[in-house]
Amino acid sequence: MGIVVLDFGSQYTPLIARRLRELRVYSVVLPGTSPVEEICMQEPQALIFSGGPASVFDSDAPLPDPRVYDLDIPILGICYGMYLLSQHFEGQMKQVGRREYGKALLIHCKGPLFAGFPEETQVWMSHSGTVTALPPGWRVVAATKENPVAAIESPHARYFAVQFHPEVVHTVEGRLMLENFLQAMKIPRDRTAEHTMELLVQEVKEKVGSERVLLALSGGVDSSTLALLLAHAGIEHTAVFVDHGLLRQGERAEVEQAMHALGVEVITVDAAGQFIQALQGVWDPEEKRKIIGREFITVLKEKAREYGPFQFLAQGTLCPDVIESAGGAGTARIKSHHNVGGLPRELPFKLLEPLRSLFKDEVRELARLLGLPDAICLRHPFPGPGLAIRILGEVTLEKLEVLRRADAIFVQALQETDIYQDVWQAFAVLTPWRSVGVTGDERHYGYVVALRAVTGVDGMTADWARLPVEFLDKVAWKITCQVPEVGRVVYDITSKPPATIEWE
Ligand code: XMP
């Protein structure tokens, strides 16, 4: 079956798996040092060695089991994977002083890996070494202006290695390169969303067995999909919806109705007082996130005592939550997502997170297969910490109320047009500042509210949405008229990077 990706610790490894799914290929990610017996259990037709933060010159550099080379299947090495192949086949390398990041122009492309490539194309580099002498018999099949050895190929074109990252979007023809690899190595491309679903079902069944599952449900697409997936797998579970008082206008009733319509029985916990109390006087975004993660677990533990015991806590954690929150080896922690980096160290449950390797658009595809209505499938993502991370600084009941009203006006206006579906996410943010205005003949000193709308595919990067100015004008008027505490409305025109989508 398909491809085994050996992971040597690159933050981009989940993206390799994602690209292969997009190309409808079966793939499994295994630790880079997995014994060959484990690799063979997957019956791979090819291997990919991922990048990684280590240097092959380190004495403790992670190496693949040397017997993988006896399997006689094609291998594609990416970045650190290139050095592994080069080292094994007796090429020579040198280390560059500091890791080099950024865009480069790929030129002089040839061979099956680069079929259909233009004369020049942008690639994304993130490397700490360079090949100085090729393994005997190998040839160079692409270069950059700075580096004459950006891609190499073994005799008989069985092994390939590239210094850049084909899996990231900044490598413009990355998808074509992976497609070429699959085609040249005759890897079948017949995986469907149904297969993905069946693999997930099999995985949760094996993991859970006859143990009991508590599901943390938020009513968003991820946890709702998970509820349906568990039901589809025949796994009984108890779904708990925590109202932490940080929800949007009317959200609790909406979630309860939607779940009822789907036949998902939900226990709603009214924990608003507890969360608001715990957030009192807290200004720091990371601290807020940690407090919310901790309070979630406190509530879930209480419910587990009441309805349990439960061995598993199921969460709709997605791949970007893990990447941005936990930070793998050499990866920066951007923010602690309430369900990953924000969790207390000691948990009285095992975590069940079957969607952990997927991205939002893939979950939406799965959701449709499982029969989740579009009204939930196409809802904008809403972060677990809710409005707490959209109120800059301290969260108070008054501020929550102001933000809820402003946000509802913005989102309703979007829903009345097609723009809601065209953007990835749109919401209002309440700043801690007030600014001077004039209403009638009176001085007015009101909150500054920011509107944020972004386009994107997976939340990892995003562009600010070019909303029509007439639309923004209408919304700003409505907010200042209907929410008198707000004196000024601004529109956020920052993309991610350098900003993030949420303000905290
Ligand atoms: P950022 O702000 O990091 O957000 O650009 C990327 C995506 O993740 C969502 N987000 C969260 N989702 N728990 C969640 O469930 C969290 O703690 C969290 N923080 C950010 C955010 O809304 C956006 O879609």
Image (cartoon, rainbow, N blue to C red):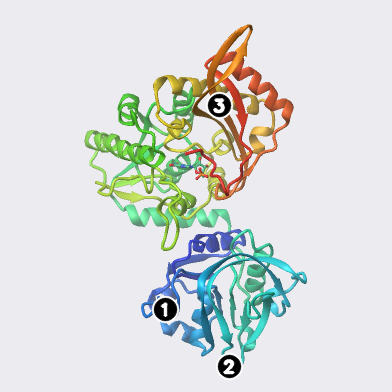
Q: How far separated are the C-alphas under marks 3 and 2?
A: 64 Å
Q: Which residue is mark 2?
A: 136
Marks 3 and 2: CB-CB under 8 Å? Answer: no
Q: Choose the circle earlier in sequence order: 3 or 1.
A: 1
Q: Where residue 21 appears, x then y in whole percent? A: 57, 60
Q: How far separated are the C-alphas under marks 2 and 1?
A: 21 Å
Tell me the number on the disc at residue 63. Answer: 1
Residue ID at (61%, 48%):
457
Q: Is residue 17 left or right of residue 335?
A: right
Q: Which residue is mark 3?
A: 449
Q: How far separated are the C-alphas under marks 3 and 1?
A: 52 Å
* Numbered-mark total: 3
Q: Amino acid at mark 2?
A: Pro
* Disc 1, SS: loop
- Above or below 100: residue 444: above
Label 2, ligand 1: CB separation under 8 Å: no
Choose top left, top right, bottom left or bottom right for residue 157. Answer: bottom right
Q: Where residue 501 appears, x then y in whole percent? A: 54, 41
Q: Is residue 129 visible?
A: yes
Q: Tell which of 364 and 324 is nearer to you.
A: 324
